[in-house]
Image (cartoon, helix red, strand yellow):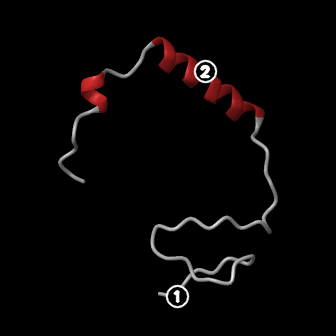
Amino acid sequence: MGSIKSKGSKKTPKYGEVIIDNSLPDLSQHPVVLKKVSEARAFLEKHPIPEHILNRHRSDK
């Protein structure tokens, strides 16, 4: 498999490394996405996820 190179970067990324490509345009979020995010945030503030669910360890990791 070939390596992925960014247009704005001279180095080859390592596994799991994040490289920000500044040659890409800065895209704004669609209004529907912003509405859904705010609705989801409001729902989670009103109905928080229980601690025992947040702290459980998954066996398939």
Residue type (three-letter) at the residue carrying disc 1: Gly
Front residue of 17 and 1: 17
Which residue carries the number 1 mark?
2
Badge 2 crowding class, 10 Å Cα cut-off, few under 14, some 14 to 19, many 20 or more, is few
Q: CA distance from mark 2 to mark 1?
A: 41 Å
Ranked by sequence position, the earlier of labels 2 and 1 is: 1
28 vs 20, left or right, is right
Residue at 48% over, 20% down: 44
Q: Quadrant of residue 13?
A: bottom right
Residue 23 appears at what percent x and percent y?
A: 80, 69
Judged from the image, the secondary structure of the residue bearing numbered disc 1 is loop
Q: Quadrant of residue 3?
A: bottom right
9 lies above or below 55: below
Which residue of the protein is positioned furthest toward the left in this rendering? Answer: 59
Residue type (three-letter) at the residue carrying disc 2: Glu
Judged from the image, the secondary structure of the residue bearing numbered disc 2 is helix
Badge 1 crowding class, 10 Å Cα cut-off, few under 14, some 14 to 19, many 20 or more, is few
Residue 12 appears at what percent x and percent y?
A: 58, 82
Dots 2, 1 in contact, CB < 8 A: no
Per the rendering, the mark at residue 35 is none
Which residue carries the number 2 mark?
39
30 lies above or below 53: below
Which residue of the protein is positioned furthest toward the bottom in this rendering? Answer: 2
31 lies above or below 49: below
5 vs 14, left or right, is right
Residue at 49% over, 76% down: 14
Front residue of 13 and 32: 13
Residue 61 appears at what percent x and percent y?
A: 24, 54
The tally of labels here is 2
